[in-house]
Image: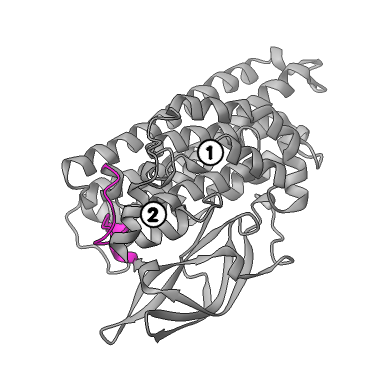
Amino acid sequence: MASMALAQAENRPAEEGSVSAAAVVANAAGMRDWLQGKAAEVEQRRSLLPEVVERLVANDLFRITQPSAYGGLGLDPRAAWEATYEIARGCSSTAWILGLSSANVVMIGKFSAEAQCDVFLSGKPTIVSLLTGGVGQDLVAESVEGGILLSGRWRYASGIDVATWAGLLVPIPVDGQMVPHVVLVPADAFAVDQASWNVLGMRGTGSKDISLTKTFVPAHRWMSWQMLQDGGCHPTCPQHGAITAAPLNPINAMSTLAPTLGVASAVVEEFRAIAKAKVSPAAQKALVEDRVAQIEAATSEATLAILRRSLLDDADDILDAARAGHVSLIQRAAMRTRFAVASRLALQTTQRLFAALGGSVLPSGTRIERLFRDVHAMSSHMLLQPDAIGEPYGRLLLDLPLPPTARI
């Protein structure tokens, strides 16, 4: 069965190089102003608008990291992070879904050839929600011939209203032990609690609670979570280049940092727009003439440029290391720590700008107020917590053993 699936994919017309990374990023940048006009409606709807999804699909943005052998563009994740950064300057929630799905598509590119055919050749856009990190409840995986019957409930299914597939972290019995696996299930198999997503920031991501009644999942559609984290792939997985051997956790962290930096950049942009129009009541002069405002405009722009460049350099470096044959534990921990520190620096930069704007941040419904909430929500993600990753990286630097629960 796996060989037939692989042959099916290999017989499809090759599309590699049909759309360049530069063209994809340009497409994303071209959506920025249009998305700004849609951002408030996305937030109010608490889900991406159909026309937003349609335009993302039309601009190939959900196909960036999809392997070319399976109808995707086959581009490196760097292109996805650059595109996500541009989209975030228009709509935070749209960028969040794009960034996460791009990383999740990389993950599926490590699965069996048969699973990749199921997902990538379904005739639908590949939009993937991934639920790990202890968000599952009442999970039951009953072994049956050819697979499992799966049921349970999960929180924080980002983008589930527009997703076509979901990856679920599920303990599956293997040789008498329960081993965590990522299990792929079509999104239309779930019941979605539409009233469950009521939050301060990133309202438009629609990260709602979902539930699944007993559903058959074939064995070719799951993989060991540890193997995915370490950069392994299924024995029947076709090789899609260096990305096939890249460890998953750093890529997942990049997928959260890219939209965070994009939203922070939008804050810098909005600060300049407000400063040009605002008159300080205390100083009785235009804010744009204030020396502090000028310094903040300069240093914030420079800081975000440095952080963005660092992310893109790491996106290249992880593939170079995978191409060389191994991404070491300390390399992974160093990257993960840089991502978390970058998130904190971006947040601190925006906080200075919010303080400089004073009451301009307070009126609800404005772009700056929405960005204030979104950048704080994004930077709080578990993959961007400096303490959580800093401790294991510090232990590695100090030649100390890692705790068994360390996820790097």
**Element carrying mark 1:** helix
Q: Nearer the viewer, residue 148 or 136?
A: 148
**For mark 1, what is the residue?**
61
Any mark on residue 146, and which?
none
Q: Is residue 173 magenta?
A: no
In the image, the segment drawn in magenta is 224-241
What amino acid is found at the position of numbered circle 2 in the picture? Met
In the foreground, 21 or 318: 21
Q: Which residue type carries mark 1?
A: Leu
Q: Position of residue 339 (x, y in %)?
A: 40, 43
Percent x, y of residue 141: 44, 82
Q: Is residue 116 above or below residue 358?
A: below
Look at mark 2 in the image and give the residue it sits on: 107
- Residue 369, given in percent of the width and then of the height, sits at 73, 39
Q: Residue at x 26, y 48 (%)?
A: 239
Q: 10 above or below 189?
A: above
Q: How is the rendered protein coloured?
A: one colour
- Identify the residue at horizontal 64%, vertical 44% (top origin): 53
Instruction: Specify the quadrant that holds the N terminus.
Output: bottom left
SS at mark 2?
helix
State the predominant SS element of the stretch in magenta. loop
Q: Residues within 10 Å of mark 2 (few under 14, many from 20)?
A: many
**Looking at the image, which is closer to me, 96 or 166?**
166
Image-based side of 394 in relation to 114, left or right: left
Q: Is residue 309 above or below residue 293?
A: below
First in sequence: mark 2 or mark 1?
A: 1
Residue 26 visible in the current orientation: yes
In this figure, what is the number of numbered marks? 2
Whether residue 225 is in magenta: the answer is: yes
